[in-house]
Amino acid sequence: MEIEQLVENAHRRLALRRLLIAIERNPDFLEAIDMNRTIKRPIELAGFAGRLNRAEKLENDLAVTGQRYDTVLADIDDQHAALKGHVGSLETTRAALDQVIGRMTASNGGPNDGSSEQGGSFGTFDGQVIDGKPV
């Protein structure tokens, strides 16, 4: 604190102390003071009702937005659960197809898709080179 402020505070305390001493010596001073005075509202409080209304409207808007957000999240959860079930059935279908393809290739001795790959009943040529390409 600055010295000026300290001096100002000391003067206020001294004035209050003098007032208290004067009231102690003469209690009639209290009767002269109007204790029922109302404090006038400062200008800052005049617009406070508008601020409160705006805050309440914002609070209501936030509640509505929160409800909409919760609804969307619930829908996403439902869709995610449906997708999990669908993925499970797709995985089951894939496994079944893998088994069918495995049985087909085992019985035919290799892939039979019309490609020119060597394999199956033609046998393998380990380490041999045909037309400049290793087989």
Image: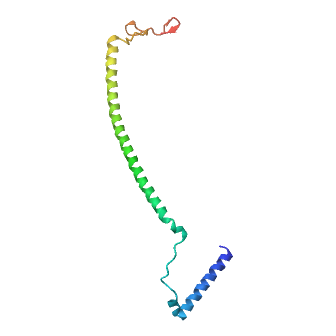
Residue 135 drawn at (x, y percent) = 47, 10
Q: Is residue 108 left or right of residue 25?
A: left
> Relative to 16, does residue 107 appear above or below in the rendering?
above
Q: Residue at x 68, y 76 (%)?
A: 4
Q: Quadrant of the N terminus?
A: bottom right
Q: Is 72 positioned to the left or the right of 132 in the image?
A: left
Q: Position of residue 19 (x, y in %)?
A: 57, 88
The reply, left or right, for residue 97 in relation to residue 65 is left
Residue drawn at x 43%, y 59% as measured from the top left: 56
The residue nearer to you, when weighing 55 against 94, is 55
The image shows residue 22 at horizontal and vertical percentages of 56, 91
Residue placed most toward the observer, 120 or 20: 20
Q: Position of residue 50 (x, y in %)?
A: 48, 62
Q: Quadrant of residue 44?
A: bottom right
Name the one closer to the observer, 19 or 49.
Answer: 49
Scheme of colours in the image: rainbow
For the view shown, which residue lies furthest in the right direction? 3
Task: Give the residue drawn at x 51%, y 5%.
Answer: 131
**In the displayed structure, would residue 96 be above or below residue 28?**
above
Seen at 54% across and 94% down, the residue is: 26
Name the outermost residue toward the top.
Answer: 131
Number of numbered callouts drawn:
0
